[in-house]
Image (spheres, helix red, strand yellow):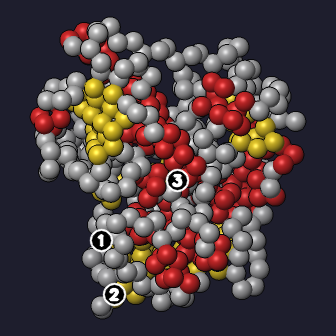
Amino acid sequence: MPHVITQSCCSDASCVYACPVNCIHPTPDEPDFHTAEMLYIDPQECVDCGACVTACPVDAIRFDGSLAPNETLFAELNADFYRDGRDRPLLAPPVPALRVRRGQDLRVAIVGSGPAAMYAADEILTIPGARVRIYERLQTPFGLARFGVAPDHQRTRGVLRQFDRILADPRVELVLGTEVGMTITHDDLLASHHGVIYAVGASADRALDIPGADLAGVTSATQFVAWYNGHPDFADRRFDLSGSRAIVIGNGNVALDVARILTMDPDLLADTDIAPYALDALRDSRIEEVTVVGRRGLEQAAFTVPELIGLCATPGVDVVVAEEQLGILPADDARAVALRGASRRDGNRRVVLDFLLSPTALSGTESVRTMEFVHNELIPAADGSMRVKATGEGHTKEAGLVLTSIGYRGRPVPGLPFDEATATVPNDAGRVIGARRAYVTGWIKRRARGFIGTNKYCAQETVRSLIDDYNSTG
C-alpha cells in the first residue's frame, strides 16, 4: 500500500533523503523543485517502508488506505505527477557535508528567527564546534511559522517542533527582544562573530493604490492573520466583522486562509492556537460571505491546489465559482474536482471565488461600504502567457471589511544595500554585495516566493557561501 503526501507538505525534502528507493520528487537538485506546489510519492515505486513518515516534520504523509475523505484527492495528485514518467537516478544525490578547514570554532550571528533563520542555524550546526547566536526582535521566536500559519493548520505548525529541537542544541543561543540596527549594529555583531546572516523576511505589504484605500475597514490580510495568531504588534487591532460580506483582494494561499477563518465555525478553532480575543470576535461575527477576487482567471489563480482542497473540505462552508469560470478547466483537473465536490447546504456560509476583476475605488463615509471593479479579459501574449486587459465594464460590491493580499515586500536593513525594485538585499548566492561578512537568506534574499521548506535549500546555499569565505579568508 503506497504512501501519499497531503496538504500540509512543507517541501523541506527531509522525506526525499529518507526514502530508500527515490520515489519522492521533485528532489532539490531537479529543476521543478522550487516551483512545485508540494512533493509527490510515486505509487508504483513506493515500497511502503514508512521512512518518509518518520522524516516528515509536518505529518503530511499518510498511508493510502488511511486517508480521510477530504484527503483522497491527494492520492490522485501524487499519481498524476508521475503519469508521463520521470527520469531519475536510483537514489537522490546526497548533500555534501560542510567542512571548516581552520582550527578556530566558527561563530555565526543570525538576525531573525523564522524558518529561513532556523534552517540556516540547522545547517551551521552540522559543523563540529560551530556556534550560533540568533537575534529576534520579538519576545517569541519562529516568525511566520508561528504568526503566519493558519491556526487550524495544526500539522503545518508541527514544523515548530523541529525548530524547538534546533534551539535545544547547547551550541545555540537565542537573544529575544533585540532589534539589530536599533539596539545593536552590524559592526557590533561582526566584533564577536565570523559572519552575520540576515533572515528578516519580507514584512511589508504591497499597497493597494486606488482611491479610498485609506478608509477604515481596509487593511492587509497579513495584519489580519497576525492578529488572529496573537502577534504582539497587532493584538490591539480591531476589525469590523459586523457586515454580511468581506472582500479579499488577491487569491493566493493567504487569501484563502483568511476567507476560511472568517467563514468557518468558530467552535472548530477553539482547540487551536488562535488568539482568544480573535476567537471571541469571530464568535460575534456577522459575516456570511467572503468574496475572494483575482484580476486573472481561475486557471491563473495564485492559490495552490492543496490549499484549495483544504478550503473545499471546510465543514459548513460553501465554495462557489461561476460555471463559466469552472467550465474552462478540464473535468479531471484537480481544481475542478475539488470545486465540484465542495458542499452545498442551506445555512452554510459562503466563500465566493471571483475572477477577472481589478479594483478601481473604495467608497464610504467613516468606513468602507462599497468597492468598485472593472472587468478584465485575458489576451494571449507573445511568450505564451495570458495578459489582463480592462474591458471598461464596471461592477460594484458591498463590503464592510476589505483585506488586501497582493504580495509582500522586504524592508531595508540598516547598514546593508537595498534594491527598491525587487525589495531584496542585493546578493550573490547569499553574499551581500558591498557589505563585509554579511549574508542573507529567505525572502529578503530571493523575494516572497516558495513555501516553508523552500527556505531550507535557500539557507544551505547561503551557509555554503559563508563557509567558503571563511575557509578562504578566515
- Residue at 65% x, 72% y is 268
Foreground pick, 181 / 183 = 183
Tag 2 residue:
367
Dot 2 falls on a residue whose secondary structure is: loop
- Residue at 81% x, 42% y is 63
Dot 1 falls on a residue whose secondary structure is: loop
The answer to whether residue 314 is left or right of residue 391 is right
Measured Cα–Cα span from mark 3 to mark 1: 22 Å
Tag 1 residue:
210
Quadrant of the drawing holding the N terminus = top right
Location of residue 244 with respect to 27 vertically, above or below: below
Foreground pick, 396 / 346 = 346
Measured Cα–Cα span from mark 3 to mark 2: 29 Å
Q: Amino acid at mark 2?
A: Ser
Q: What is the x, y in percent for residue 404?
A: 40, 67
Q: Residues within 10 Å of mark 2 (few under 14, many from 20)?
A: some
Q: What is the x, y in percent for residue 295?
A: 47, 62
User: Of circles 3 and 2, which is in front?
Assistant: 2
Q: Is residue 364 visible?
A: yes
Residue 302: assigned label: 3
